[in-house]
Image (spheres, helix red, strand yellow):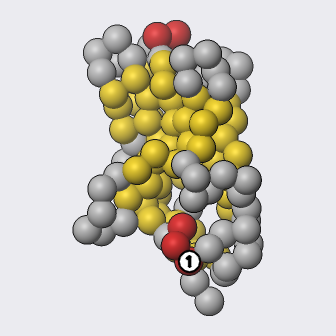
């Protein structure tokens, strides 16, 4: 079992940057498919960025070239650097990871991009 806790959300203006953090504890040695997701009310949760089985970063087309996902070697912290933010990036952002039991989600952190 693992526990995930997001932080770093807030209100920013279009064009600005923001970095989200995910603190991970528990049986981190078994973690796979770590990534960031976001959800807007009335919409399905979508993957923003994640690590594939080989450790390669994958990005949604909507954020490719603007967002960067990273993690520590110990896999106890994961980051999402968000650059050139747009109003359509406004959402609740969740970090997530899969272990031997199943996929686990954090509580979410609100990101609002507005003038």
Q: Quadrant where the C terminus lies?
A: bottom right
Residue at (36% x, 66% y) in the render: 40
Vertical placement of 89 versus 103: above or below?
below
Write the residue at 74% across / 72% down.
Answer: 16
Q: Is residue 108 visible?
A: no
* Residue 105 visible somewhere in the drawing: yes
Question: What is the x, y in percent for residue 75?
Answer: 61, 22
In front of the other: 89 or 26? 89
Vertical order, 38 against 101 (above or below): below
Q: Local crowd at mark 1 within 10 Å, few (<14), some, or many (≥20)?
A: some
- Determine which residue is flagged by label 1: 87
**Residue 74: image x %, image y %?**
65, 18
Q: Nearer the viewer, residue 32 or 29?
A: 32
Q: Position of residue 34 (x, y in %)?
A: 51, 29
Q: Secondary structure at mark 1?
A: helix
In the figure, is residue 84 to the left or right of 20? right
Return the x and y of residue 2 as percentages of the image width and height.
Answer: 40, 23
Q: Residue at x 33, y 27 (%)?
A: 103
| Residue at image point 66% right, 80% down | 13
């Amino acid at each position: 079992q693992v526990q995930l806790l997001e932080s770093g959300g807030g209100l920013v203006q279009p064009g600005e940057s923001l970095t989200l953090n995910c603190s991970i504890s528990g049986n981190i040695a078994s973690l796979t498919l770590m990534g960031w997701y976001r959800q807007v009310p009335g919409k399905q949760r979508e993957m923003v960025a994640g690590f594939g089985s080989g450790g390669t970063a994958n990005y949604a087309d909507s954020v490719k070239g603007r967002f960067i996902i990273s993690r520590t070697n110990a896999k106890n912290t994961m980051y999402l650097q968000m650059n050139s933010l747009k109003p359509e990036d406004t959402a609740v952002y969740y970090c997530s990871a899969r272990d031997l039991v199943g996929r686990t989600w954090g509580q979410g952190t609100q990101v609002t991009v507005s003038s």
